[in-house]
Image: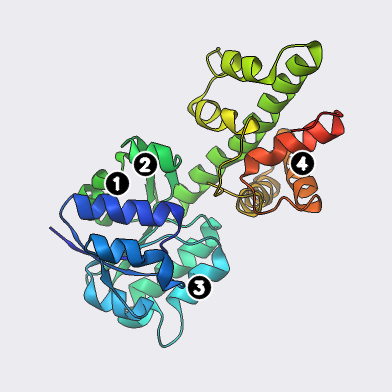
């Protein structure tokens, strides 16, 4: 079993640590707010006082935080993980940031004789708990071969996409569709509801119809009741939409449905719904339609 580190113990990160512990790995973890990680310490996770300490204690270091600023704060400075790297160590960064940001961090890791792969995931907490998570990897092929067994313990679907940054490009290409699908699903529910069909019946029919992607099946019911804790809140979703539109401009790919869906996320922020799961796009459209949740 490998000596693993994990930086960022949010909703997804903490569940990944639990899964890795169940597989028999030794895990040293760090989170900015330690109280959120106490249950993992109770499960057997070791605590690291800083990202540097985690990197020093581990051969493979997972990282999963919200944005580029958080990635840099974990990596840089005297307590950052870069200071704890040594030749042969590998960073497995699961954060969703721009491909350029990830390539820059990989270059810094290689200056230490270590390496970094970008390894975002596709799925939700439920997908992870059910053992159906999909993992993408961008980086050197030989490094991918080293981390593959570890990622299989998280996955189990693991795909090598290509060089550094390309797994993130794939992840952003996937995530733009999540908001687009949620908006289209909301349109269908509201059209049915205002026709006289109960919302519950509309959701049941739609989530068992030809349009029922895995995302629609697990997030569609959120139009009936939002989760107590957002799986992926409005700010996080909009960050990915903006990354997609930035890539679209750079690559001359029009993203019309992404742009429209992004405006509904902006409207959600304006309505004070920023901390809710991005399925709250339904509430924005419902408000425009004269319908109450």
**Nearest-to-viewer mark from 2 and 3:** 2
Residue on which the image places disc 3 = 72
Q: Is residue 186 above or below residue 57?
A: above
**Nearest-to-viewer mark from 3 and 1:** 1
Q: Is residue 106 above or below residue 223?
A: below
- Between the residue at mark 3 and the residue at mark 1, the CA separation in whole angstroms equals 24 Å
Which color scheme is applied?
A: rainbow
Q: How many marks?
A: 4
Residue on which the image places disc 1 = 154
Element under disc 1: helix
Within 10 angstroms of label 3, few (less than 14), some, or many (20 or more) residues? some
Question: Do the CB atoms of the residues marked 1 and 4 lie less than 8 Å apart?
Answer: no
In the picture, the quarter occupied by the N terminus is bottom left
Question: Which disc, if any, is residue 264?
Answer: 4
Tell me the quarter of the picture where residue 222 sits.
Answer: top right
Question: Do the CB atoms of the residues marked 2 and 1 lie less than 8 Å apart?
Answer: yes
Q: Earlier in the sequence, mark 3 or mark 1?
A: 3
Q: Is residue 96 above or below residue 288?
A: below
Within 10 angstroms of label 2, few (less than 14), some, or many (20 or more) residues? many
Q: Give left or right: position of 201 versus 7.
A: right
Percent coordinates x, y for residue 252 in the rendering: 69, 43
Within 10 angstroms of label 4, few (less than 14), some, or many (20 or more) residues? many
Tell me the quarter of the picture where residue 202 sits.
Answer: top right
Q: Earlier in the sequence, mark 2 or mark 3?
A: 3
């Amino acid at each position: 079993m490998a000596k693993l580190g994990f930086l960022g113990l949010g909703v997804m990160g903490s569940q990944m640590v639990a899964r890795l512990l169940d597989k028999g790995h030794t895990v040293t973890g760090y989170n900015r707010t330690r109280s959120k990680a106490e249950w993992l310490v109770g499960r057997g996770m070791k605590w690291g006082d800083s990202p540097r300490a985690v990197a020093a204690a581990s051969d493979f270091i997972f990282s999963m935080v919200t944005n580029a600023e958080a990635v840099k704060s974990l990596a840089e400075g005297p307590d950052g993980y870069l200071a704890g790297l040594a030749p042969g160590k590998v960073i497995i960064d699961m954060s969703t940031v721009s491909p350029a940001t990830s390539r820059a961090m990989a270059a810094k890791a290689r200056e230490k004789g270590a390496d970094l792969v970008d390894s975002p995931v596709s799925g939700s907490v439920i997908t992870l708990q059910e053992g159906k998570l999909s993992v993408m990897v961008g980086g050197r092929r030989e490094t991918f071969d080293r981390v593959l067994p570890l990622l299989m313990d998280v996955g189990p679907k693991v795909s090598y996409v290509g060089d550094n940054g390309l797994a993130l490009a794939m992840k952003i290409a996937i995530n733009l569709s999540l908001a687009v699908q949620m908006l289209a699903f909301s349109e269908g529910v509201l059209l049915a509801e205002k026709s006289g069909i109960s919302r519950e019946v509309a959701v049941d029919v739609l989530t068992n119809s030809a349009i029922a992607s895995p995302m629609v099946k697990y997030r569609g019911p959120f139009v009936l009741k939002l989760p107590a804790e957002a799986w992926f809140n409005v700010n996080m979703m909009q960050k990915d939409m903006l990354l997609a539109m930035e890539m679209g401009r750079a690559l001359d790919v029009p993203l019309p449905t992404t742009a429209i869906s992004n405006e509904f996320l902006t409207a959600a922020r304006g309505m004070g719904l920023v901390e809710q799961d991005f399925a709250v796009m339904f509430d924005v459209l419902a408000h425009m339609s004269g319908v109450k949740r």
